[in-house]
Image (cartoon, rainbow, N blue to C red):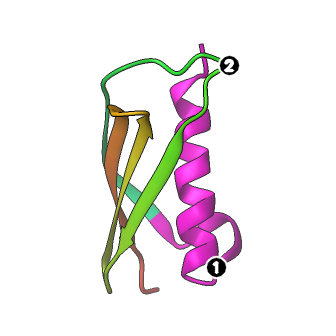
């Protein structure tokens, strides 16, 4: 099974790259939920929606939602 922390890291990196901050260093995980496991030989798709202060992500395998969550952008 792929650990949930690896899925979160994937989402943080992708959102970080999208907003121009490598590694997502200015992001904070607001919430996340895991619904179904991802096995090492399975493919998954990450979808992100980025607003000014919040970013949402959803990880799917075929039509099954594996995880979803909300990231907040910190404006320090």
Kind of element beneath mark 2: loop
Q: Please give the name of the residue rendered at 51% of the width and 45% of the height, measured from the top-left corner.
A: 45
Please state the horizontal and vertical placement of residue 44, each as a whole percent of the image.
54, 37
Q: Is residue 19 magenta?
A: yes
Q: Is residue 3 magenta?
A: yes
Please state the horizontal and vertical placement of residue 59, each as a whole percent of the image.
43, 42
Quadrant placement of the N terminus: top right
| Residue 41 position (above or below residue 34) | above
- Camera-side residue of 51 and 41: 41
> In the drawing, what numbered circle is on residue 40?
2
For label 1, the crowd category at 10 Å Cα-Cα, with few meaning under 14, some 14 to 19 and many 20 or more, is: some
Residue pointed to by mark 1? 21
Asked if residue 21 lies left or right of residue 51, the reply is: right
| Residue 33 position (above or below residue 23) | above
Q: Please give the name of the residue rendered at 37% of the width and 36% of the height, measured from the top-left corner.
A: 67
Q: Which residues are magenta?
A: 1-27
Q: Is residue 25 visible?
A: no
Kind of element beneath mark 1: loop
Asked if residue 75 lies left or right of residue 20, the reply is: left
Please state the horizontal and vertical placement of residue 35, each as a whole percent of the image.
30, 24
- Camera-side residue of 13 and 46: 46
Q: Is residue 76 visible?
A: yes
Dominant secondary structure of the residues highlighted in magenta in the image = helix
Please tell me whether mark 2 or mark 1 is closer to you in this view.
2
Mark 2 or 1, nearer chain start: 1
- Camera-side residue of 21 and 76: 21
Rendered image quadrant of residue 7: top right
- Camera-side residue of 32 and 44: 44
Q: Please give the name of the residue rendered at 40% of the width and 75% of the height, measured from the top-left corner.
A: 73
Rendered image quadrant of residue 5: top right
């Amino acid at each position: 099974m792929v650990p949930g922390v690896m899925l979160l890291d994937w989402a943080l990196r992708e959102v970080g790259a999208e907003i121009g901050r490598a590694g997502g260093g200015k992001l904070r995980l607001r919430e996340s939920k895991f619904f179904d496991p991802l096995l090492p030989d399975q493919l998954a798709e990450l979808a992100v929606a980025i607003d000014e202060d919040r970013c949402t992500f959803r990880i799917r395998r075929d039509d099954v939602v594996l995880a979803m969550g909300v990231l907040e952008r910190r404006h320090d």
